[in-house]
């Protein structure tokens, strides 16, 4: 019965189907061909290609302060030590404090203990500046309050001994800044920030022998935070964890050397809305691996990876939420 109804409808419209599925028959003996398009329409392809979501406009680089290096209340600490197994501890409570610690064990003998520099500051407009030369040094900064400034600098571009060092900064409050710079091999840098408007810049470079890479970790809880991690060398690991809205994470890893066993590893975790993450990795003939996790709305992730012949690129982006954008660009054979 259904077939009769369908045939009746076709006759009523004056059109009947021919045996060839691409043709239809018109009463009177004429035959027309149905125009068909095979594959994806060109317009759809162009819309997809031209609509790539290259959004994440990441920046950071905000660390400054010096100029007068904080005066106003004029409390100061200046400690300078030369040798091994030294300890320096500056504790300040109040406003407008300044802490300056210099330690040099550049003639370090393996097996000996390095130096320890510690600065504790509580209040507004505090500053801390720790400079260390040599191996196995540890520097830590603990700040509570607004407008604090922390700077940790290990090694120099000319000194060879600046390995196995550790830098740690803990900032609680609004408008804090932290900069950690480490040169040569097997160094570790960690920053923990609680509050709004914090910025972290971590810069690590393995030595001329590139024997082992460095580790950088930034954990920020609050709104408007920025974390920048730059690593040059081999076997580098960078990790950023940010909770809040409008956070920015920038990770740049550049491999030096052509050992296929070497790697760049980057992990980014952002929880909140309107966060951005930019990851750039260059592994030469080694391995790039990037993991980006974003939970929230209107987040954006941008990953660029380059590997030469024999190298390998791996990227994984996970976004949970609405109106998020992600783009991964890989250059290399794999």
Image (cartoon, rainbow, N blue to C red):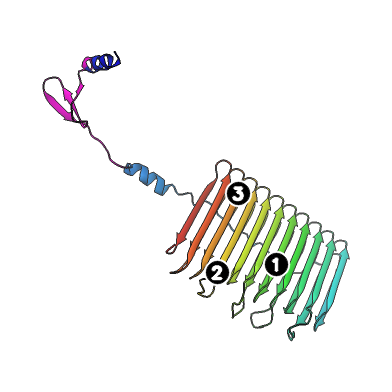
**Does the stretch in magenta take in 25?**
yes
Judging by the rendered image, the residue that carries numbered circle 3 is 294
Judging depth in this view, the residue of 72 and 128 nearest the camera is 128
- For the N terminus, give its image quadrant: top left
Disc 1 versus disc 3: distance between alpha carbons? Answer: 23 Å
Q: Quadrant of the C terminus?
A: bottom left
CA–CA distance in space, label 2 to label 1: 17 Å
Which residue is at 67% across, 55% downward? Answer: 241
| Location of residue 57 in the rendering, given as x and y in whole percent from the top left corner | 55, 54
Label 3 SS: strand
Q: Name the residue under label 2.
A: 254
Per the image, the residue denoted by label 1 is 189
- Residue 175 seen from this side: no
Give the x, y percent position of residue 100.
80, 73
Q: Residue at the location (41% across, 46% down)?
A: 48
Give residue 152's position: percent from left, percent from top: 73, 70
The residue stretch that appears in magenta: 11-39
Residue placed most toward the observer, 66 or 134 = 134
> Sequence-wise, which precedes: disc 2 or disc 1?
1
């Amino acid at each position: 019965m259904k077939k009769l109804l369908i045939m009746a409808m076709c006759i009523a419209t004056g059109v009947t189907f021919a045996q060839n599925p691409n043709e239809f028959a018109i009463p009177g003996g004429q035959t027309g061909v149905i125009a068909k398009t095979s594959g994806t329409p060109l317009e759809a392809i162009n819309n997809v290609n031209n609509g790539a979501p290259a959004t994440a406009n990441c920046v950071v680089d905000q660390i400054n302060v010096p100029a007068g290096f904080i005066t106003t209340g004029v409390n100061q600490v200046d400690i300078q030590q030369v040798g091994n197994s030294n300890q320096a501890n500056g504790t300040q409570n109040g406003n407008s404090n300044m802490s300056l610690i210099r330690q040099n064990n550049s003639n370090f003998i393996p097996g000996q203990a390095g130096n320890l520099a510690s600065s504790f500051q509580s209040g507004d407009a505090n500053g801390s500046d720790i400079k260390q030369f040599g191996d196995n040094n540890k520097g830590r900064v603990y700040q509570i309050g607004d407008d604090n400034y922390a700077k940790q600098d290990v090694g120099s571009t000319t000194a060879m001994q600046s390995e196995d060092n550790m830098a740690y900064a803990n900032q609680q409050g609004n408008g804090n800044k932290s900069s950690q710079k480490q040169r040569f091999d097997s160094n570790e840098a960690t920053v923990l920030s609680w509050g709004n408007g914090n910025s972290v810049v971590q810069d690590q470079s393995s030595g001329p022998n590139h024997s082992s890479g460095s580790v950088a970790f930034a954990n920020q809880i609050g709104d408007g935070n920025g974390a920048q991690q730059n690593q040059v060398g081999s076997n580098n690991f960078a990790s950023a964890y940010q909770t809040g809205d409008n956070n920015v994470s920038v990770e740049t890893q550049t491999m030096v050397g052509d050992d296929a066993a070497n790697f760049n590893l980057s992990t980014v975790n952002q929880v909140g809305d309107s966060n951005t993450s930019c990851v750039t990795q260059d592994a030469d003939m080694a391995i790039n691996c990037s993991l980006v996790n974003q939970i929230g709305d209107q987040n954006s992730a941008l990953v660029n990876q380059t590997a030469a012949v024999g190298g390998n690129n791996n990227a994984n982006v996970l976004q949970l939420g609405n109106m998020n954008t992600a783009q991964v660009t890989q250059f290399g054979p794999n």
